[in-house]
Image: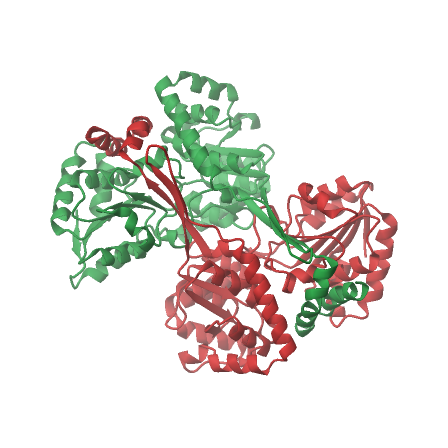
Chain colours: A green, B red
């Protein structure tokens, strides 16, 4: 792996390149994606079916073929290995339990004068979850999107996933049954986003669309944003690791590779205070590469987008990592918890050598849908919050109006809004 | 005002038109807005200054002229009427106190096996607030955007507001001083959004942009979404009122007009079970119109976008209102609190005859930046949440890994990700 030293003259240039990782050319595909969306908006299912023929190489004859049968899901669930089934159930329970802790509650407070202020929390009516894939679909993506929607209390959950050559991944079907999802549609890419944003004769219009995807999906989500809400615009996956001299090179190397094997565009970045550790990790990465089933992808990712940075101290390491704002951040130092306060920007934080990032991908409990490309500076992990919205509550008492009405009327008057002013004054006159 | 009866054959058509209120032709202005943004992204201040010359009819000669002087703000504050100053301070305190109640907290829970899960809450580094206006700028908009950012703990707050003919509203300047805002820039419209999204030599790049604006601002916010986060895409203001036979026609009429006076495009919709009340409100609206300082705007809004709907019962009224999902919802019935549970979609809910909507615009405490055009189905009021983001926290104990590591490795293996699997197994072997 490339090793950079923060004391080098050329460091800033190299580091700025890392900050630009994950930039996607959304503009470059906006034309085609916008065309696909418009077709679906105006022609519904017929556009959807011809887009499926074009991209997934099979053409549904009837609208009903878009829907995956619940019998197929039940059968897939029955067919999977019992140990795996139990593992998926354990994952479901742990993810559910974590997300339950994130649920905000409706509250109301009464002031001494009887005025009530509060906030009401309500689930959205319909959520649309996009699960990428076809044969390579990940059941974990389904769990991570479905569970927060279910915990939030969403009544109607719609899933779209592409079925290239009309084939679906059996594990994904099994996971759908496990999650008690019934509305699963065989449609992918921008077409799926358009169908859920505008609705078709078969696919319901939803209020919120979440889930990962390629640049066409990301662009479609951006284009329909405002028509529906979306979780975030996500790019390639990435890991940052902060390590001191106490870290083990074999752990760090395999953790870096677990990110690199996702995608040639994935970034794996280690920042350490120990230059010897840097060298040992680099060697270990090379040694492991040959053992991986996805060696080619991982190698390209490590070579083109991997980096080890050696800093003068941990403060500098943390500062650089905050600038990177990685999707996943491992902290492998003598006392990782003591660094938590200074970590400002990261999608998920994995503390200590016993916490490899993949534990969070599947089973620890927190969501694996996380902000990438530095957007952890402003986006949060996927959560129940993405499937909820709030309404403010105000109930003024007569006394409450008497106490603050005059000041309200004055500000309204100053802003030149006399109907605003009068709507307050008419109450004051009658109190 | 137009009165519709839900029992009429033509009702559905008329109602569907109300559902389409507030649709904006974002696509129609995307070309021009995108051009302006690109200029700012590539040319910075020099583009900004020429855009100000083009739209606001003055050209800053020096970059430093973009920044409003803090002395001017202090002077404006000193010059306003003491009663108004006190009213604004009261508003600040009440808004601050309400938003403090919305602050989520970092939490961590330890499992019996020593594993720690949690969520860290952090403010974004920089927030950009857009305040529309020039001479008609509203100090209340400043308070409603600044206070949640300050309560959230944002370190650097940037404000942009247009200065047509290089003039600024004195009240807005006073409010800036009151809010202790120091970085206020004289730039408006899409130019301001571009400057805050990409940064220029003078205006810092921010992480989140919030605040209302016209279609150019809304479109610019949509285009930069992903580069930064935004609060929402907001359209014209609107009110929905649910009323039964206990409501007073004078209160309802002036409340409808307080929305209508904002904007010709504003919508004011009353849904009631009492057809006599409907007629009385309509008459009263007509009677009040002539008394308003903004009569012309209010009349056009009421005539073209106002409606009274008479339903057979309150359940139907509530169902229709949930479909409308209004920005502001007044509930003026015998026992308004008893209807709160059935209200699903509204930006802010005003309960009882003593709670005119304008009390929420200025002083009650909740935010007045609210989702419009039916987007209350998925957006929330502006809040501290818009200026915060979360990071998941995972710290596995050795025992915790022993308890769930095997299942994690199994799922990873099933998904074909062998580096993921090995990163877990290497820990299991060493435990």
Residue A26 lies left or right of residue B338; in this view the side is: left
- Give the x, y percent position of residue A9: 16, 64
The answer to which of A340 and A213 lies nearer the viewer is A340
Q: Relative to A69, is B249 above or below? A: below
Q: Residue at x 19, y 40 (%)?
A: A253
Q: Residue at x 52, y 22 (%)?
A: A69
- Give the x, y percent position of residue A306: 22, 47
Instruction: Please say whether residue B261 is visible from this viewpoint.
Output: no
- Give the x, y percent position of residue A214: 39, 42
Instruction: Please say whether residue B12 is visible from this viewpoint.
Output: yes
- Give the x, y percent position of residue B298: 74, 65
Q: Residue at x 22, y 44 (%)?
A: A302
Quadrant for the C terminus of chain B, please. Answer: top left
Quarter of the view holding residue B7: top right
Residue A399 lies left or right of residue A213; in this view the side is: right
Q: Relative to B191, is A244 above or below? A: above
Quarter of the view holding residue B79: bottom right
Report the number of discs: 0
Q: Relative to A57, is B244 above or below? A: below
- Extreme right residue here? B276
Residue A131 lies left or right of residue B18; in this view the side is: left
Quadrant for the N terminus of chain B, please. Answer: bottom right
Residue B150 lies left or right of residue A289; in this view the side is: right
Q: Residue at x 24, y 58 (%)?
A: A315
């Amino acid at each position: 792996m490339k090793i950079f030293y923060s004391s080098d003259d050329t460091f800033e240039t190299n580091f700025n390149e890392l900050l630009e990782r994950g930039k996607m050319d959304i503009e470059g595909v906006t034309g085609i994606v916008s065309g696909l969306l418009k077709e679906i908006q105006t022609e519904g299912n017929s556009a959807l079916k011809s887009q499926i023929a074009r991209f997934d190489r099979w053409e549904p004859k009837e609208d009903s073929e878009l829907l995956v049968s619940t019998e197929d899901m039940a059968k897939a669930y029955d067919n999977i290995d019992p140990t795996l089934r139990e593992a998926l159930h354990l994952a479901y329970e742990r993810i559910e339990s974590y997300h339950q802790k994130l649920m905000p509650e409706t509250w109301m407070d009464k002031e001494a004068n009887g005025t009530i202020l509060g906030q009401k929390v309500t689930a959205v009516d319909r959520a649309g979850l996009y699960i990428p894939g076809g044969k390579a679909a990940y059941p974990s993506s389904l769990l991570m999107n479905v569970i927060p929607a279910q915990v939030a209390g969403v009544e109607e959950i719609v899933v779209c996933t592409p079925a290239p050559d009309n084939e679906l991944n059996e594990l994904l079907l099994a996971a759908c049954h496990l999650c008690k999802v019934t509305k699963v549609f065989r449609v992918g890419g921008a077409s799926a986003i358009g169908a859920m944003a505008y609705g078709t004769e078969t696919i319901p219009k939803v209020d919120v669309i979440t889930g990962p995807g390629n640049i066409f999906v990301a662009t479609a989500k951006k284009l329909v944003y405002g028509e529906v809400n979306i979780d975030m615009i996500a790019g390639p996956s990435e890991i940052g690791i902060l390590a001191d001299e106490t870290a083990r090179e074999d752990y760090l190397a395999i953790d870096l590779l677990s990110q690199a094997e996702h995608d040639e565009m994935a970034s794996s970045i280690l920042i350490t205070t120990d230059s010897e550790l840097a060298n040992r990790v680099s060697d270990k990465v090379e040694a492991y590469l040959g053992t991986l089933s996805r060696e080619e992808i991982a190698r390209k990712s490590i070579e083109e987008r991997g980096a080890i940075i050696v800093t003068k101290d941990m403060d500098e390491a943390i500062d650089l990592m905050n600038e990177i704002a990685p999707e996943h951040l491992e902290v492998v130092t003598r006392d990782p918890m003591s660094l938590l306060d200074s970590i400002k920007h990261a999608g998920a934080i994995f503390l200590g050598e016993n916490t490899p990032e993949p534990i969070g991908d599947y089973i620890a409990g927190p969501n694996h849908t996380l902000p990438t490309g530095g957007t952890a500076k402003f986006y949060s992990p996927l959560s129940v919050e993405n499937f909820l919205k709030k309404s403010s509550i105000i109930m003024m008492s007569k006394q409450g109006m008497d106490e603050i009405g005059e000041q309200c009327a004055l500000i309204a008057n100053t802003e030149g809004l006399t109907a605003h002013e009068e709507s307050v004054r008419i109450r004051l006159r009658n109190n």
